[in-house]
Image (cartoon, rainbow, N blue to C red):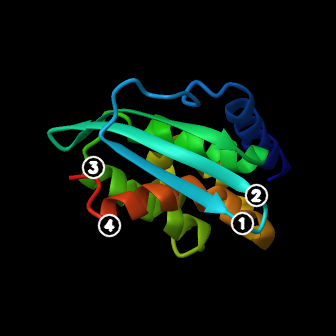
Amino acid sequence: MEAMNELYSDIILEHNQHQENKRLLKIYTMEERGHNPSCGDDITLQANIRDGVIVDAAYTGHGCAISQASADIMIDIIKGKSVKEALRLVDLFLEMIKRNITDEDQLEELEDAIALKNISNMPARVKCAVLAWHTLKEAVERGEIQ
């Protein structure tokens, strides 16, 4: 179990340090800000959506390693997916964080996001991990994304 925690920590560190998705998009059809006042994490999520598919996505802003890594991972997972599929993955991620879904086989499609699974053991960090995911979900629910 210790080796798995180290692997997960390495994935989070890697995504925090190599933030290919941390940039402004030249063309975007959705922009949504997510802010966590309790710790100061603040991101703006942008996505270019065509015909219901997330062609590209990126984020800007600042925050702790967990919020930045989580945003980077989420974007890796949703790029190229339909909005409907992306929203399903957001819900799966949120259920994982709440520990409602713990089966590794079900969670496999979350790819590197599984590294954030044990964040539920640190309640103060949960808001950091879910910030980008909630931001995307809010944009969809407000009808910003079709």
Verify CB contact (< 8 Å) between mark 1 and mark 2.
Answer: yes
User: Mark 1, residues whose alpha carbon is within 10 Å: few (<14), some, or many (≥20)?
Assistant: few
**Residue 96 screen position, x and y as percent:** 55, 65
- Distance from disc 2 to disc 3, alpha carbons, whole Å, reads 28 Å
Q: Earlier in the sequence, mark 4 or mark 3?
A: 3
Q: Earlier in the sequence, mark 3 or mark 1?
A: 1
Verify CB contact (< 8 Å) between mark 2 and mark 3.
Answer: no
- Of circles 4 and 3, the one toward us is 4
- Distance from disc 3 to disc 1, alpha carbons, whole Å, reads 28 Å
- Of circles 3 and 1, the one toward us is 1
- Amino acid found under the numbered disc labelled 2: Gly
Q: Residue at x 76, y 72 (%)?
A: 123
- Amino acid found under the numbered disc labelled 1: Pro
Q: For residue 144, which quarter of the picture?
A: bottom left
Question: Residue at label 2?
Answer: 40
Question: Residue at label 3?
Answer: 83
Verify CB contact (< 8 Å) between mark 4 and mark 3.
Answer: no
**Could you say whether the residue bearing mark 2 is in a helix, strand or loop?**
loop
Q: Is residue 138 above or below residue 10?
A: below
- Amino acid found under the numbered disc labelled 3: Val
Q: Is residue 109 above or below residue 79?
A: below
Question: Residue at label 4?
Answer: 141
Q: Earlier in the sequence, mark 4 or mark 1?
A: 1
Q: Is residue 40 left or right of residue 129?
A: right
Question: Residue at label 1?
Answer: 37
